[in-house]
Image (cartoon, rainbow, N blue to C red):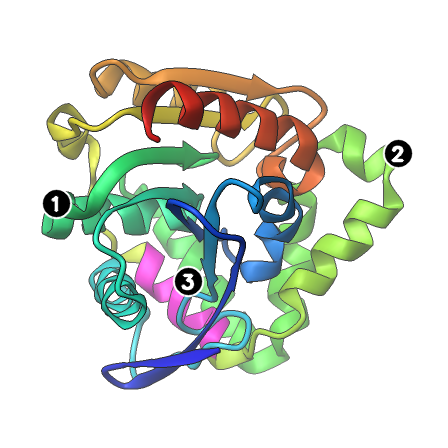
Amino acid sequence: MNFRSNDAELFFQVIGRGPELIFLHPFPSSHEFWLQVAQLLMEEYRCVMPDLRGLGQSQPGDGPATMPKHAEDLECLCRHLGVGKAVFIGCSIGGYVLFEFWRRHRERFNGLVLADTKSPADTETERANRLKLADRAENEGPSAVVETMLPKLLAESTQRNRPDIVSAARQTMARSTAKGLAANLRGMAEREDSTATLTGITVPTLVIGGQEDVPSPRAELERLTKGIHGAELRLIDHAGHFAAFEQPDAFARALRLFLHSNAR
């Protein structure tokens, strides 16, 4: 299904029925990242999974895909579906978007799940690396981004023992265009630091991530947990930055426990 948000036509999928859970996938993946988790929760929850602008089947629009643009897209999706309040779940860039969405629309939150993400803005080195990769995407095509990033996104144990997961993860990235990937890399490079936002988050919050996550290691997840009053931390074994994709059963169990305890 599709909806319009300003300068872009965006794709989303909905499965299940019940209270809404809205899932925001990581870069450079698509809504398919969440399908296994959603299938485990669909008997109790209505799972809404958009493709972020420029990723999957969603158009990039014009210019960088900034966090304010993504947040406005999310608000348009809520209005399109008639969602009043929901639990929002964001992995990696999905978390960056939810920090911005909280600053703009905190009244929409029943709960918050931050998966394999972090609050600081990019360092100068990280920013420069993103911009170089954006240029490579435009000059060499999407595979330059996918093959550069894939080893950093999956746990070393997954890469060693689960070629099926490696192949499936690559497939979730396959739909994105060079323009869309570059737009998101440039948007992430200019995102603001969200660390000061943490103390103002007042809804039940779960911080969750893979034990082997390299881009958002345990120390980053612990900082998030300490920064948000009452937040819970859960770590998943044998998983990296794509923890929900690598270990969907464990991720869904942790999410269901959190939801049953805090956000029904």
Q: Is residue 81 magenta?
A: no
Q: Who comes first in sequence, dot 3 or dot 2?
A: 2
Mark 3 packing: few (<14 Cα in 10 Å), some, or many (20+)? many
The amino acid marked with disc number 1 is Glu
Q: Residue at x 37, y 16 (%)?
A: 232
Nearest to the eye among marks 3 and 2: give it. Answer: 2
Mark 1 packing: few (<14 Cα in 10 Å), some, or many (20+)? few
What's the distance in space between the residues labelled 1 and 2, CA to CA?
43 Å
- Look at mark 3 in the image and give the residue it sits on: 185
What's the distance in space between the residues labelled 3 and 2, CA to CA?
30 Å
- Look at mark 2 in the image and give the residue it sits on: 161
Q: Is residue 216 above or below residue 232?
A: below
Q: Position of residue 231 (x, y in %)?
A: 30, 18
Q: Is residue 208 above or below residue 101?
A: above
Question: Magenta stretch?
Answer: 180-188
The circle on residue 260 is none
What's the distance in space between the residues labelled 3 and 1, CA to CA?
29 Å
User: Where, quadrant-wise, is the C terminus in this rendering?
Assistant: top left
Q: Is residue 53 visible?
A: yes
Q: Who comes first in sequence, dot 1 or dot 2?
A: 1
Q: Residue at x 48, y 78 (%)?
A: 1
Q: Position of residue 178 (x, y in %)?
A: 54, 78
Q: Main secondary structure of the magenta part?
A: helix
Location of residue 29 (image quadrant): bottom right
Q: Is residue 40 above or below residue 150?
A: above
Q: Is residue 263 left or right of residue 216?
A: left
Q: Secondary structure at mark 1?
A: helix
The amino acid marked with disc number 3 is Leu
Q: Residue at x 27, y 86 (%)?
A: 7
